[in-house]
Amino acid sequence: VGATLLTMPLLSPLLLPLLLGCASALTALHTPRPVIRPSTCAKSTHRDTLSTSPLVMPLRSARPSRLLPVQMGLDVTTAKPEDVKVLVLGCTGYIGRFVTKELINRGYDVTAFTRERAGVGGKKSKEDIERDFSGAKVVVGDVCDAESLKRNGFGDKIDVVVSCLASRTGGIQDSWDIDYGASKKALDALIEQGGSHYVLLSAICVQKPLLEFQRAKLKLEQEIEAQDSVSYSIIRPTAFFKSLAGQVQLVKDGKPYIMFGDGQLSKANAISEPDLAAVIADGISKKEMHNKIIPVGGPGEPLTPLEQSKILFELFDKEPKYIKVPIGVMDAVIGVLDFIGNFVPSFKDSAEFGRIGKYYAVEDMVGPSYGTTTLREFFEDVAENGLQGQELGDQAVFNIDGATK
């Protein structure tokens, strides 16, 4: 079923995850389930109904910042980078790769924590990662296992943890295991060891938490704010350039641009990956970013899908043509999956994937501007060089694998 869906030339990149979710769940009915060890992370039982009202983007946390940040260890804002030991979690993830390299380039003493087989599809070994991150120490362990994390990640004294961890799928349990559980274990280990600062890569959408991964991230944020043992910087980016590039190949091939409604929903001022990595690294050295929640968008005005499509048609010199999909289509699919999920647990994640797709189809993602690279410049680069080597893997909500053409 999945292979058939992938061959449909006009299939919406947003509908694809919904339908593939159905296919995956159907396959699971006929496939022996693997034995999975019990999770050590928290679970959520809350459910909400998705709203289509825009996100509100405050410029700072609603909670008051501490006037005097607690520093139990090294003052990382004044220390030389080479004297600051930074542990990066999620180093092989899409954003984590850029962050790890940015920290290495700035001269920090970086330890990159990874799985035994990491990267998209588990294709990279420890040796591959060591080649990718020349200048960093690479250690292998399990971020969901507190003892493994302490033994391998905190074998040396760590001053700063930078967590770029994110659920690989957005599934319900995976969200709580990774977005909350694993990052919380790292916070606890840093505090126990007497570290100084914690930087979390969160997401601006947690300000309207209707999805399970958003609730998990928000709970972690709240626990970070509640403690006073280490200072923190919580970075909430709007959207990544890559997440808006799902239809580049379609337009390049002369196919219609597919959008929901009239194309005026879900405007965003996305940020480039290198620009975001620079902001995250600044979260260590800049005292004014400590004990703050920092919304981060890219330069320029927020663009709607319709405005983004016009850039692509112009770059590829194609006549604009569109397929407009009613939002109600997604509601119908989600409703069916939710109903089946009451009887077949494997459909619960499929319904959640559908809600994720809808959320990003209707919600604005807007924040204060940082960085220098515009979305148009990114599209121009993609038009010339393609998406090779920039895979999203399991997190390819818009069906980008970066290795097509």
Image: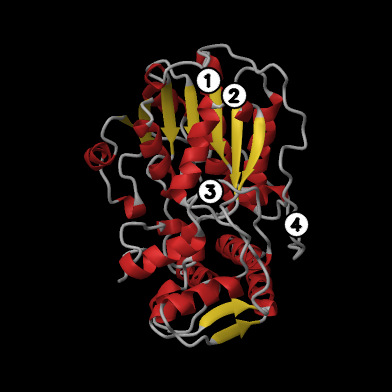
Label 1 element class: loop
Front disc: 4 or 2? 2
Q: CA distance from mark 4 to mark 3?
A: 18 Å
| Residue at x 67%, y 19% (from the top left corner) | 228
Of the image marks 4 and 2, the number of the one nearer the N terminus: 4
Q: Nearer the viewer, residue 289 or 151?
A: 289
Near mark 3 (Cα within 10 A), the count class, few <14, some 14-19 or many ≥20, is many
Amino acid beneath label 2: Lys
Of the image marks 2 and 1, the number of the one nearer the N terminus: 1
Instruction: Give the label on residue 77, or none.
Output: 1
Image quadrant of residue 129? top left
Does residue 134 appear left or right of residue 65 in this picture?
A: left
**Above or below: residue 251 compared with residue 351:** below
Label 2 element class: helix
Q: Which residue is mark 4?
A: 48
Q: Nearer the viewer, residue 15 or 345?
A: 15
Front disc: 2 or 3? 2
Instruction: Give the label on residue 109, or none.
Output: none
Of the image marks 3 and 1, the number of the one nearer the N terminus: 1
